[in-house]
Image: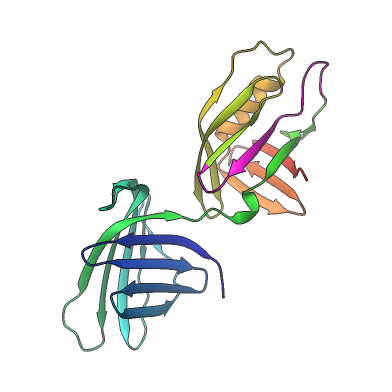
Amino acid sequence: MSEIYFTASGLSPEWTLDIAADRIRLQTGGDTLNTPHTVPDRAMDANVKRYRPMTEATEMNVEIRQGPCESESGISRPYSVQVKYKHTGESKYTTLSGCGAYVMEYRLHDIWALESLNGDVITLAEGLERPYFEIDSRKSAFMGSTSCNQMRGTLFFEPGLLRFNEVLTTRKMCPGGLEAEFLKTLQSTIHYKLENGRLTLTNPSGAELVFRKVD
């Protein structure tokens, strides 16, 4: 059974939705609907995904739309979700509305130290430490060091995508140009890959950061 990568929920009536690589499961009241996973349709002009799973017993349409969503319980989440479903033989869909979020890959929840920047192995000038960050997947946030300044910020995550946003640093002057190039590259990367204890961040323009996991 695959790990869940997206969850959503709503009230009036109470319901929950889980999406994993091999299934989509909707629970509402005493009813549980399970369907195989399907590849979502994507809107061209917005971050909107539409799943349309179907079985002999159930039809379901799930729309996930990026944008702040405040649930009826007062919790803010980054995606609004609408679910329409019906059982075989029913003429009308039941519509549910709520909020959701992607579940960050657990392997990212660690400390990562910079090994190379845009193809060059990092060499440290006197007085500098190796840039690193620690990811808190539960809060979608990170903190660490640029080489001589402390930094922190928020993370945007979807499967295969990882963006470092709202980066704040302390203001100490740093020797050399490592900090400036590191921060510029970090904030431009959008894709990630985890392999053999390495985290690689890239973007389509060729920017690349390679980090090693710190035990």
**In the image, which residues are magenta?**
124-140
Q: Provide the major secondary structure of the magenta segment.
A: loop
Position of the N terminus, as image quadrant, is bottom right
Q: Is residue 121 left or right of residue 163?
A: right
Q: Please identify the residue farthest to the left as the structure is shown.
A: 91
**Position of residue 161 measured from the top left corner of the image (x, y, whole percent):** 54, 48
The relative height of residue 29 versus residue 131 in the rendered view (above or below) is: below
Indicate whether residue 178 is drawn in magenta. no
**Position of residue 35 measured from the top left corner of the image (x, y, whole percent):** 41, 79
Between 121 and 23, the residue placed more toward the observer is 23
Q: Is residue 177 left or right of residue 3?
A: right
The relative height of residue 192 versus residue 120 in the rendered view (above or below) is: below
Q: Quadrant of residue 169?
A: top right
Q: Quadrant of residue 27?
A: bottom left
**Position of residue 163 measured from the top left corner of the image (x, y, whole percent):** 53, 40
Give the number of callouts.
0
Q: Quadrant of residue 200?
A: top right
Q: Is residue 65 left or right of residue 142?
A: left
